[in-house]
């Protein structure tokens, strides 16, 4: 167990994750890094010994930009797997957060920095790119490819054998039955705002 673990971003999700980590005795000491708190980002960047961290900022592009700055140092982007009995893939990238009660089936590839929220299910042979958010109780069916910087709203169903391009937001409760080939905000398979 590491002496200190750092969460970058002290917003609501950071506070929630800190509670999970402490309650489940994953880390003894969890510290926030945020410009609004005592440990400012510039001070954090001056640490020279090993640093173990995760980024708790929900916007994928911001999470990615912070990661690119920190990975050049002696910092380690830790994957956090909260109590789960349904993880059957060992292809989970650095910095992912897998909340309780998720299902990750066989031959799933999760890239870097993904958030997989409560009760989500990712079926066999799915690839999830980098810095994606998969909302609570969402289902991604088999042989599907999810791009980078994707936000899947809670209670969404994505059918099998689909491709979702980079930079897509899918609204909560959507049912996706066709591939998405253009960045934008989607409700079901209808684009409601191009990006």
Image: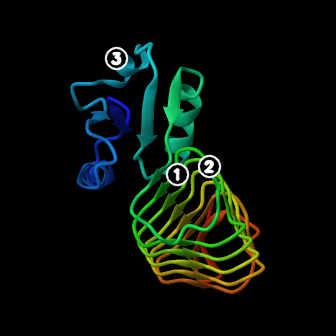
The kind of secondary structure element at disc 2 is loop
Q: Secondary structure at mark 1?
A: loop
Total marks in image: 3
C-alpha separation, residue under disc 3 versus residue under disc 2: 27 Å
Q: Closer to the camera: disc 3 or disc 2?
A: 2
Quadrant holding the C terminus: bottom right
Front label number (3 vs 1): 1
Give the image location of residue 91, x and y in percent. 67, 56
147 relative position to 19: left or right: right
As drawn, the label of residue 43 is 3
Mark 3 surroundings: few (<14), some (14-19) or many (≥20) residues within 10 A:
few
In this rendering, position of residue 111 left or right of residue 83: right
SS at badge 3: helix
**Type of colouring:** rainbow
10 Å crowding of disc 1: few (<14), some (14-19), many (20+): many
Return the residue at label 1: 96
Observer-nearest residue: 137 or 186? 137
Asked whether 156 or 79 is in front, the reply is 79
Per the model, the C-alpha gap separating discs 1 and 2 is 6 Å
Q: Which mark is residue 168?
A: none
C-alpha gap between disc 3 and disc 1: 25 Å
Residue sitting at x 58%, y 44%: 94
Position of the N terminus, as image quadrant, is top left
Q: Position of residue 128 (x, y in %)?
A: 66, 61
Mark 2, residue position: 93
Determine crowd level at label 2: few under 14, some 14-19, many 20+ residues with C-alpha closer than 10 A. some
- The image shows residue 102 at horizontal and vertical percentages of 48, 71
Question: Is the C-beta separation of discs 1 and 2 under 8 Å?
Answer: yes
- The numbered mark, 3 or 2, whose residue comes first in the sequence reads 3
Position of residue 28 relative to residue 90, above or below, is above
């Amino acid at each position: 167990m590491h002496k200190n673990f750092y969460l970058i971003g002290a917003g609501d999700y950071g506070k929630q994750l800190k509670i999970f980590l402490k309650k489940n005795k994953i880390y003894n000491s969890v510290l926030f890094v945020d410009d609004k708190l005592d440990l400012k980002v510039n001070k954090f960047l001056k640490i020279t010994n090993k640093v173990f961290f995760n980024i708790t900022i929900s916007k994928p592009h911001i999470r990615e930009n912070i990661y690119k700055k920190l990975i050049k140092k002696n910092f380690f982007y830790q994957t956090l797997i909260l109590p789960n009995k349904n993880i059957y893939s060992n292809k989970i990238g650095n910095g992912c957060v897998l909340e309780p009660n998720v299902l990750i089936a066989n031959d799933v590839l999760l890239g870097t920095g993904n958030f997989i929220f409560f009760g989500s299910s990712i079926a066999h042979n799915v690839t999830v790119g980098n810095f994606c958010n998969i909302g609570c109780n969402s289902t991604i069916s088999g042989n599907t490819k999810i791009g980078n910087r994707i936000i899947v709203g809670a209670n969404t169903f994505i059918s099998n054998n689909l491709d979702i391009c980079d930079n897509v937001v899918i609204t909560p409760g959507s049912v996706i039955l066709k591939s998405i080939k253009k960045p934008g905000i989607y409700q079901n398979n209808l684009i409601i705002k191009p990006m």
